[in-house]
């Protein structure tokens, strides 16, 4: 089975044929996040440069799903990763990518879904993956980070272990036995901060039996040996994600919110958490300014509006110190499904990939489908 991956869209795409594949220049990764940068990347399979007719072109790479998975997981993981962690990752990445291709969630037209709204006093939006036209997934963190064979060639040992994990779980996905064995929506992220989140507080108001909020006693770790299994080089620039603090002067905060939201709130008088999910992630935040007041959500929009590089999570408390705003937060990412750092710690403690998946995707079952 093949998958089509949109690598980048730009006015001009520079590429060259190399003996080992197609080299694309200036591929931007981590768009809008703190690890945003460009690099050259190498790809196998076929590469099509599509003219979008609007002055831009898109590079689309077509390749076998299992090869895609090997690459995706090699990007996320390190050569030292525990094999059970890699197997867990192989299963959730495969489930995630096969689910829409099997027609299970093509209905995620959530941009117009119930609860989505954009009015002067209420801006409640979330981001889904059905925004791609002409390809299945993009190569950035919006879908799953995919860097072709760039990492594989830089880290042959990691790629070998990942391939072993992909092969050992070939065709295996997580399914929901209460929903005709539909492939599960296997979300994941870096660190829950102590408790995982539910689907409906982050995306559409829909409840999944296998995406329940569970306590996670695993991700509170400073063990560099374990962390390095999940955080590759540029991710390791990020420290202190289990508990973190961001401090702004009132002027800085007003300027950031104005820039990121496009709305002039005047002086910011208060940030008031209105609704939180079970992990503590805020999904409705009231911004009270001297000129304007509104409620913003859900979690990703809050993270985007309150930082130029996206806050680690929306699970934070707001404190005032003198005139400063201090955000004391926990976790990194949306918190729904598998906590990658928690899973790395579990694997390190001797849990199998079946046990890790059963922990974060309560009630889901493993099934070989292809
Ligand atoms: Zn995408
Ligand atoms: Zn966790």
Image (spheres, rainbow, N blue to C red):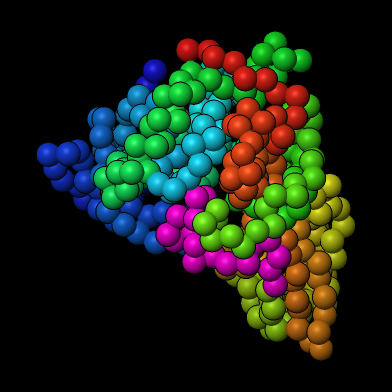
The residue at 53%/13% (across/down) is 369
Q: Is residue 297 above or below residue 85?
A: below
Q: Which of the two residues, 156 or 94, is positioned nearer the viewer here?
A: 156
Most extreme residue toward the left is: 19
Residue 31 visible to the viewer: no
Residue 346 visible to the viewer: yes
The residue at 54%/61% (across/down) is 224
Picture coordinates of residue 64 (x, y %)? 35, 24
Picture coordinates of residue 126 (x, y %)? 67, 45
Q: Which of the two residues, 119 or 189, is positioned nearer the viewer here?
A: 189
Q: Is residue 146 above or below residue 30?
A: above
For residue 50, side relative to residue 71 (left or right): left
* Displayed quadrant of residue 51: top left
Q: Is residue 324 part of the magenta span, yes or no?
A: no
Please give the range of residues in magenta.
228-245
The residue at 72%/55% (across/down) is 193
Q: Is residue 146 above or below residue 163?
A: below
Picture coordinates of residue 198 (x, y %)? 77, 40
Q: Is residue 240 part of the magenta span, yes or no?
A: yes
For residue 119, side relative to residue 256 (left or right): right
Picture coordinates of residue 46 (x, y %)? 25, 30
Most extreme residue toward the front is: 350
Q: Across the whole image, how many numbered discs are drawn on residues?
A: 0
Most extreme residue toward the bottom is: 322
The residue at 32%/48% (across/down) is 155
Name the quadrant of the N terminus.
top left
For residue 193, side relative to residue 277 (left or right): left
């Amino acid at each position: 089975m093949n998958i089509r991956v949109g690598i980048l869209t730009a006015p001009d795409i520079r590429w060259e044929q190399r003996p080992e594949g197609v080299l694309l220049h200036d591929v931007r990764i981590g768009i809008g996040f703190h690890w945003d940068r460009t690099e050259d990347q190498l790809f196998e399979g076929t590469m099509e440069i599509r003219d979008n007719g609007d002055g831009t072109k898109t590079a689309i790479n077509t390749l076998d799903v299992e090869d895609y998975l090997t690459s995706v997981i090699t990007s996320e993981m390190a050569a030292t990763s525990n094999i059970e962690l890699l197997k867990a990752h192989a299963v959730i990445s495969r489930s995630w990518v096969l689910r829409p291709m099997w027609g299970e969630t093509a209905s995620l037209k959530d941009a117009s879904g119930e609860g989505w709204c954009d009015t002067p006093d209420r801006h409640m939006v979330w981001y889904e993956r059905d925004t791609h036209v002409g390809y299945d997934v993009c190569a950035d963190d919006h879908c799953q980070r995919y860097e072709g064979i760039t990492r594989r060639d830089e880290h042959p040992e990691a790629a070998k272990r990942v391939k072993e994990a992909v092969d050992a779980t070939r065709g295996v996905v997580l399914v929901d036995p209460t929903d005709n064995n539909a492939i599960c929506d296997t979300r994941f992220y870096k660190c829950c901060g102590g408790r995982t989140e539910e689907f409906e507080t982050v995306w559409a108001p829909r409840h999944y039996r296998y995406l329940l909020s569970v306590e996670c006693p695993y991700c509170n770790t400073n063990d560099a040996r374990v962390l390095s299994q999940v955080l590759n080089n540029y991710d390791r620039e990020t420290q202190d994600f289990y508990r973190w603090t961001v401090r702004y002067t009132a002027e800085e905060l007003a300027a950031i919110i104005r820039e990121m939201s496009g709305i002039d709130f005047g002086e910011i008088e208060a940030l008031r958490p209105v609704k939180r999910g079970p992990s503590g992630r805020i999904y409705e935040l009231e911004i009270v300014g001297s000129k304007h007041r509104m409620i913003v959500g859900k979690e990703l929009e809050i993270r985007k509006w309150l930082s130029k590089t996206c806050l680690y999570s929306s699970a934070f408390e707001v404190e005032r110190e003198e005139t400063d705003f201090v955000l004391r937060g926990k976790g990194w990412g949306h918190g729904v499904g598998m906590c990658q750092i928690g899973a790395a710690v579990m694997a390190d403690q001797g849990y199998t990939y079946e046990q890790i998946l059963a922990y974060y995707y309560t009630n889901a079952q493993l099934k070989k489908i292809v």
